[in-house]
Amino acid sequence: SLTTGSGFAYGAGYRNRRLFDREAAITAWAAASLKRYWALEARFDLPDLADGRLFIGAYARRQTYPQEDFFGVGPDARRNDHTTFQIANTIVGGRAGVKLAPVITAGGGLEYFRPEIGRGRNNSVPTIEDRFTDATAPGLSAARNFLRTMAFVDVDYRQPKNARRGGWYRLEASDVRDRGNAFTFRRLDVDLRQYASILAERRVLAIRLFASTSDPASGARVPFYLMPSLGGH
């Protein structure tokens, strides 16, 4: 899918889940929006190896988001500093995991990505370079190549997956590095979701707790476009 705020989007996709005697699946799609956001993605997955206990997947994606909003970094950000920027990104990666129990999955992955920051295309607000510099918006000055390694644990006992009851808990640790280590950091994400239903499951109460923390290496910074943000969905 495209990001929140991209406007009305349209696209097409193709999926085949019957490759290699139904052991493999390939998915490809393309989408664009009326605000000129667009993305292309292709995936290859082996989701049910070893009788469903092991999965392996690889993916590639190219996307351009031309009207992203930026107000500044941290609690001192001001609505009056509303600016726009364009981010184009090339992403290539893979993941693998193993089911430790029917509801517990653990795994990891490796991902290469190259974000490129440019002038925003929203003419109603200033572009980011008019009010911010690389000092106040880390990572603004040049494109960077990043390599991310990750490990995760996932506990999922939702019933059904479009949940009426149960829970979904996820812990993911990442190490993000760039050439020269100017923007090298570690990140930890915790996502906890619990569901309960009443009135014969016709009403569902969903409670969510999400926390994300980033720890830069000595002398390094976290790029503003990789920081957790408030807002959106």
Image (cartoon, rainbow, N blue to C red):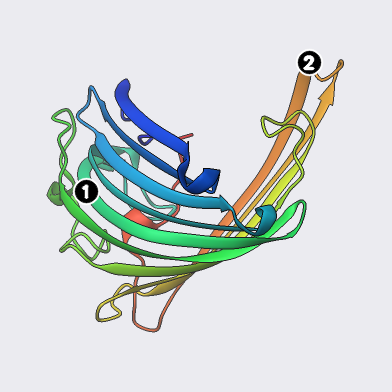
Q: Nearer the viewer, residue 52 or 233?
A: 52
Q: Nearer the viewer, residue 225 or 136?
A: 225
Drawn side of residue 181 relative to residue 133, left or right:
right
Q: Position of residue 120 (x, y in %)?
A: 16, 40
Q: Residue at x 77, y 52 (%)?
A: 102
Drawn side of residue 99 relative to residue 148, left or right:
right
Q: Residue furthest bottom?
A: 218
Disc 1/disc 2 C-alpha distance (Å) = 42 Å
Q: Residue at x 27, y 63 (%)?
A: 138
Sequence-wise, which precedes: disc 1 or disc 2? 1
User: Which label belongs to residue 228?
Assistant: none
User: In the rendered structure, which amino acid carries the disc numbered 2?
Assistant: Arg
- Circle 2 residues within 10 Å: few <14, some 14–19, many ≥20: few
Q: Residue at x 59, y 61 (%)?
A: 97
Q: Residue 30 sits in which quadrant?
A: top left
Q: Is residue 7 visible?
A: no
User: In the rendered structure, which amino acid carries the disc numbered 1?
Assistant: Ala
- Locate the N terminus and report the quarter of the image it occupies: top left
Answer yes or no: do the residues labelled 1 and 2 have beta carbons within 8 Å? no
The residue carrying mark 1 is 88
The residue carrying mark 2 is 202
Drawn side of residue 87 relative to residue 99, left or right:
left
